[in-house]
Image: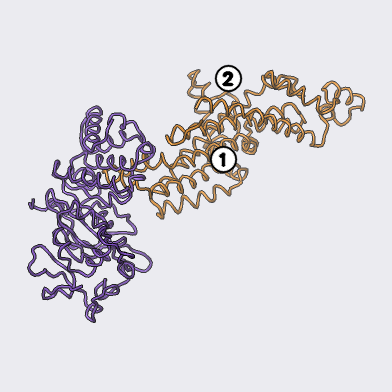
Chain colours: A orange, B purple
């Protein structure tokens, strides 16, 4: 198991290398010159050329790439062209905001999705099953930006239950320690702020959770239906076991592996796909960070931001793979 | 060993409902099992043996299946009318069951110990330690070596025969009065079959558990059963003590089954087989269900449904065939 983990972590290197190369070229394919954007439309040609030289963008691409790569190897993510700060220093608050939002969204998606799938399979062809699966179908086909706007319109504007956007009450800002506000407010014992943070999280988290929730529900249902026809389920019932335990112990553990795979893949999509949600709800996360960097042609920020997200994505899927072996004793990694 | 019956099935009718209407898989089946007795239920695939056994456990998938009539009396208690809660108390405790496929009948993701202890703890109020000890004792009782070690093993680490022993240990762990074994040896190879059968017979004597042994293998019946029921297309066609069935079979179907058992003493090119297939449940509405495949068929068989007749000169021998209306014999 340990050697497998090490092997998997080592195999990250070529993946991330390839990715860094692709991102490097793709940004440079976007029209627009960083120096021109920083200096504005009215800047002289000389000033632009001077800044380009300062930024090192006059160098041939391979020198630029290897300088960047050299930095990465020593743990240096580069420096933002716009803010002139080290990216490794300024990235964390954005990353923390995205992690907080994605983890909440995923928790909602897993809790509701898995349970809806289980109940649908348990009471197959019941009205619950039909309604849940129609909702799931609507869920997967729902555009996030539309859902987000509708949520704001209904729950924030018409009902006035929840705030429209942001992470915290502007007049009562959270003092950040870890930048994950749910933890920060609890550490400081500020329950009022904790509820504020939760209220701000609900709408964006549900918007972000909708698609993964729908997919998880459908996969759980089909996986459970297959397992519940197994002989060992009949054995468990013949022992006199309650249906609840037959379903939640014997069936679920067998049905969960395909669901885990989907959870792993969807978590990655959440990290990247949060951009729309973050924009609609003015959530100061990675999506916003990278989106602003693209507008400013802030090459190092785009490169490093995408690389960090890719790294987390690959790590999540490594954890999922290791979980398979923890759940199923027949799976052995050598 | 004839005492009061442990299980008394009366006019049991279990049907499956589909778009074509009601399809009876078990049709007015009656039989009883005495305390400590081993009863064999024999028949081809699809004749309603497994549905009968699942009906007794009330584990028929519902819908589409449903027990539509009759009584299942377990020590006088009618299970057909029992609540699901009461059935959970009965399953695994008073009636236990083992299945055909030992390879898939155990949950692959839990240890043997976990699955054994789980069964014990459902029905008794003992602590974890005692339950563990009881599970180990059961494994030893069914003849598994290194019982403590097996407790921590997963099903895929055991062979088919060992898994069937575990299934038997699990089924008997609460000392049920009745064990239903649905083709327990079909998936095992011959030497293991013999071991499992002798184990079952041994435990039947030791624990005084009545056994309903469902099989399509007449050799198995001859080896362990005391009494036999032959089923065909959802109906009981013949019932007799085991020696009587082999010596003096009456129903043309039983006769056919016996003829298709290979005999090592004969050097036959081709094994006898009954022509045709078991009819689809519900496809025969009138007459004897075996008529289409019967060598002795006559006009009446196609229109009237034969009742069970007592065979002349034999005790406890009944047969569902017009040939025996006056106690006549089948000459074949």
What residue is at 69 percent from the left and 31 percent from the top? A290
* Residue A75 in sight here: yes
Tag 1 residue: A207
Q: CA distance from mark 2 to mark 1?
A: 25 Å
Q: Is residue A116 left or right of residue A150?
A: left
Residue B136 circle label:
none
Q: Are marks 2 and 1 in contact (CB under 8 Å)?
A: no
The residue at the point 18 percent across, 51 percent down is B224
Whether callout 2 and callout 1 share a subunit is answered yes
Residue A278 is left or right of residue A298, and the answer is left
Residue at (36% x, 41% y) in the render: B107
Between discs 2 and 1, the one toward the N terminus: 2
Q: Position of residue A47 (x, y in %)?
A: 90, 24
Q: Which residue sits at x=40%, y=52%?
A: A124
Q: Chain of mark 1?
A: A
- Let me know if residue A232 appears in the view: no
> Residue B237 is drawn in which quadrant?
bottom left
Nearer-the-camera pick, A208 or B145 = B145
Quarter of image, res A147: top right
Q: Mark 2 — residue? A: A176
Q: Is A140 above or below relative to A10?
A: below
Residue sitting at the far bottom: B299
Decide: is B135 above or below B210: above
Q: Is residue A273 above or below residue A231?
A: above
Work out which quarter of the rendered image holds the C terminus of chain B and state it.
bottom left
Q: Is disc 1 placed on a helix, strand or loop?
A: helix
- Crowding at dot 1, Cα within 10 Å, few <14 / some 14-19 / many 20+, comes out as many
Which quadrant of the view contains residue A89?
A: top right
Residue B320 appears at what percent x and percent y? 18, 70
- Please provide percent x and percent y for residue B281: 31, 66
């Amino acid at each position: 198991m340990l050697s497998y983990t090490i092997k998997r972590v080592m195999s990250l290197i070529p993946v991330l290398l390839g990715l860094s190369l692709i991102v490097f070229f793709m940004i440079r394919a976007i029209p627009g010159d960083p120096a021109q954007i920083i200096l504005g439309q009215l800047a002289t040609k000389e000033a632009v050329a001077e800044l380009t030289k300062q930024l090192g963008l006059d160098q041939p691409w391979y020198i630029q790439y290897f300088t960047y790569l050299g930095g990465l190897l020593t743990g240096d993510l580069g420096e933002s062209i716009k803010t002139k700060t080290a990216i490794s220093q300024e990235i964390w608050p954005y990353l923390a905001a995205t992690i907080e939002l994605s983890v909440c969204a995923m928790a909602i998606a897993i809790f509701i999705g898995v349970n809806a799938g289980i109940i649908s399979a348990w009471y197959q062809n019941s009205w619950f099953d039909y309604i849940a699966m129609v909702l799931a179908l609507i869920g997967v086909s729902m555009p996030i930006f539309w859902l987000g706007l509708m949520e704001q319109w209904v729950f924030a504007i018409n009902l006035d239950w929840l705030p429209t956007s942001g992470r915290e009450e502007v007049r009562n800002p959270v003092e950040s320690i870890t930048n994950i506000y749910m933890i920060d407010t609890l550490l400081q014992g500020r329950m009022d702020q904790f509820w504020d943070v939760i209220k701000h999280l609900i709408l964006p988290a549900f918007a972000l959770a909708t698609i993964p929730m729908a997919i998880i529900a459908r996969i759980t249902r089909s996986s459970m239906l297959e397992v519940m026809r197994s002989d060992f389920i009949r054995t468990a019932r013949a022992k006199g076991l309650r249906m609840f335990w037959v379903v939640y112990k014997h069936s679920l553990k067998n049905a969960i592996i395909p669901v885990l795979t989907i959870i792993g893949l969807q978590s990655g999509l959440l990290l990247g796909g949060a951009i729309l949600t973050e924009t609609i709800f003015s959530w100061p996360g990675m999506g916003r960070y990278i989106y602003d960097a693209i507008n400013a042609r802030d090459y190092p920020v785009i490169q490093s931001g995408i690389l960090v997200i890719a790294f987390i994505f690959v790590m999540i899927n490594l954890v999922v793979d290791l979980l398979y072996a923890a759940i199923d004793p027949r799976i052995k990694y050598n | 060993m004839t005492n009061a019956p442990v299980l008394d099935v009366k006019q049991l009718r279990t049907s499956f409902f589909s778009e074509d209407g009601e399809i009876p898989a078990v049709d007015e089946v009656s039989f009883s099992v005495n305390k400590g007795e081993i009863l064999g239920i024999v028949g081809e695939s699809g004749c309603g043996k497994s549905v009968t056994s699942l009906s007794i456990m009330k584990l028929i998938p519902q819908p589409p299946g449903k027990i539509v009539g009759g009584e299942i009396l377990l020590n006088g208690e009618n299970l057909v009318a029992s609540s699901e809660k009461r059935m959970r108390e009965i399953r695994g405790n008073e009636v236990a069951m083992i299945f055909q496929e030992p390879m898939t009948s155990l949950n692959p993701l839990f240890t043997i110990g976990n699955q054994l202890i789980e069964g014990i703890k459902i029905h008794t109020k003992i602590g974890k330690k005692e339950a563990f000890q009881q599970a180990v004792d059961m494994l030893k009782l069914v003849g598994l070596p290194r019982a403590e070690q097996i407790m921590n093993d997963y099903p895929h680490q055991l062979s088919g025969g060992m898994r069937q022993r575990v299934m038997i240990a699990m089924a008997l762990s609460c000392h049920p009065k009745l064990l239903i074994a649905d083709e327990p040896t079909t998936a095992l190879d011959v030497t293991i079959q013999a071991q499992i059968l002798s184990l079952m017979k041994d435990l039947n004597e030791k624990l005084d558990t009545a056994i309903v042994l469902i099989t399509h293998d007449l050799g198995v019946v001859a080896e362990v059963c005391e009494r036999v029921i032959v089923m065909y297309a959802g109906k009981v066609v013949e019932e007799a003590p085991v020696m009587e069935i082999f010596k003096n079979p009456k129903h043309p179907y039983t006769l056919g089954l016996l003829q298709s058992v290979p005999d090592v003493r004969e050097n036959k090119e081709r094994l006898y087989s009954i022509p045709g297939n078991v009819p689809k449940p519900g496809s025969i509405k009138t007459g004897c269900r075996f008529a289409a495949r019967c060598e002795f068929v006559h006009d009446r068989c196609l229109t009237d449904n034969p009742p069970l007749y007592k065979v002349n000169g034999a005790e406890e021998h009944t047969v569902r065939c017009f040939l025996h209306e006056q106690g006549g014999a089948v000459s074949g």
